[in-house]
Amino acid sequence: MIPRLVLGTLSLAVLAALSWAVLSLPAQPPGLTAEALGKLPESGVTNPVTAVLLNYRGHDTLLEVAVLLLAITGVWSLRQGEFPAADLRERPLLMSLLRVLLPVLVLTAGYLLWIGAFAPGGAFQGGAVAGGALVLGILGGLAGRWMRRESLLRLGLALGVLVFASVCAVTKALTGGLLQYPPGQGGVWILLIEAAALASIGLTLGLLYVGGRPPAGPAEPGEKEPDGHG
Amino acid sequence: MVETGFTVYLLAGAGVFIIGFHALLAQAHLLRRIMALNVMGSGVFMVFIALSARTAGEAPDPVPHAMVLTGIVVSVCATGLALALADRLQSVTGATELEGGPAPGPNAGSGGEESHP
């Protein structure tokens, strides 16, 4: 290991360098606020952060959604997940909490997705809430049967990237530019991408909590149940 | 007065980053190192948000906001992958530290945590 004194000196030196760096930044940088707000009427949404995420810098967000898919792929290739056994009779309090909380969380995720067009919110915030709901569901042992339907999970995890890339292809064909939405239609395309991204983000975050691929069980059980993300 | 507020946030962001930086080098246990990386990331996000509030104009700059927003989710996923890798390392070799630290030995799986109070 590095000696304590060297480590402390090094940390202080880096702190001094960083402090100098942040203090020497211009006090009133022009930034991109004017450009971002100036083009806002054409972007299809009125929330500038959503416009940056899914219109001006859409490629960046596409790659970030792909990073989430890569992360869960890596986790699945390393470990097998552990699911708590589904015995809710021993945990009546948890069940009565989940009965109220899960619908509220799903509703909140959808609400955040919708208001992202004009207020703080969007796929990432909604996806985080949906991921939390999925973690609660897994802890309550409610997700055990879904977890055995691995092909469905794979589809859900990849949905964000698939829809995003398809929108890239379609907009390329329509307007000649990748993610250059047809005039006046930006909002619809953005909502479509965000809905798919929310499902994938929520599923990714929830399944990361499990920490591995679904357990090998009876593949694709016959029982029918309503499909959906977290 | 307003300028002082920004300076405090910028320096605090650098400070949070350094706390993580120091822990990343000082701690050998992988779990602590992963936590240290997260602390460093929080410092970077803090600087970004402070900078976006300081740009010219009335509204804060949305571009750093969007970067931090996606950055948070990406860092959570990176943490998940790092934890899976650390767990894999432990289950294969029994080590909770990377090579080059104090010799892990066969009992490192249970004893690694106590050796760094």
Image (cartoon, helix red, strand yellow):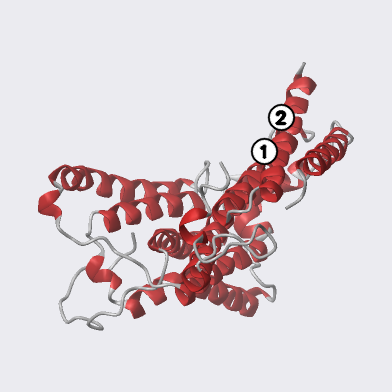
Residue A109 in the figure: left or right of residue B8: left
Which chain is indicated by disc 1?
B
**Residue occupying the point 50% across, 45% down:** A121
Which mark identifies residue B46? 1
Residue B18 in the figure: left or right of residue A76: right
Q: Could you give the CA–CA distance between mark 1 and mark 2, rounded to whole angstroms?
A: 7 Å
Q: Nearer the viewer, residue B53 or A154?
A: A154
**Residue occupying the point 68% across, 58% down:** A56
Q: Is residue A145 above or below residue A10?
A: below
Where disc 1 sits, the SS reads: helix
Neighbourhood count class around disc 2 (C-alpha, 10 Å): few under 14, some 14–19, many 20 upward: some
Q: Is residue A177 above or below residue B83?
A: below
Whether label 1 touches label 2, CB < 8 Å: yes
Q: Nearer the viewer, residue B68 or A59?
A: B68
**Residue occupying the point 40% across, 76% down:** A155
**Residue occupying the point 48% across, 49% down:** A125
Is residue A181 visible in the rendered image? The answer is no
Q: Amino acid at mark 1?
A: Met
Residue A36 in the figure: left or right of residue A66: right
Residue found at the very far left of the displayed protein? A89
Where disc 2 sits, the SS reads: helix
Which chain is indicated by disc 2?
B
Q: Is residue B17 above or below residue B33?
A: above
Q: Nearer the viewer, residue A20 or A178?
A: A20
Is residue B67 visible in the rendered image? The answer is yes
Which mark identifies residue B9? 2
**The C terminus of chain B - image quarter:** top right
Q: Nearer the viewer, residue A191 or B63?
A: B63
Q: Position of residue B20 (x, y in %)?
A: 67, 43
Q: Position of residue B14 (x, y in %)?
A: 75, 37
Q: Amino acid at mark 2?
A: Tyr
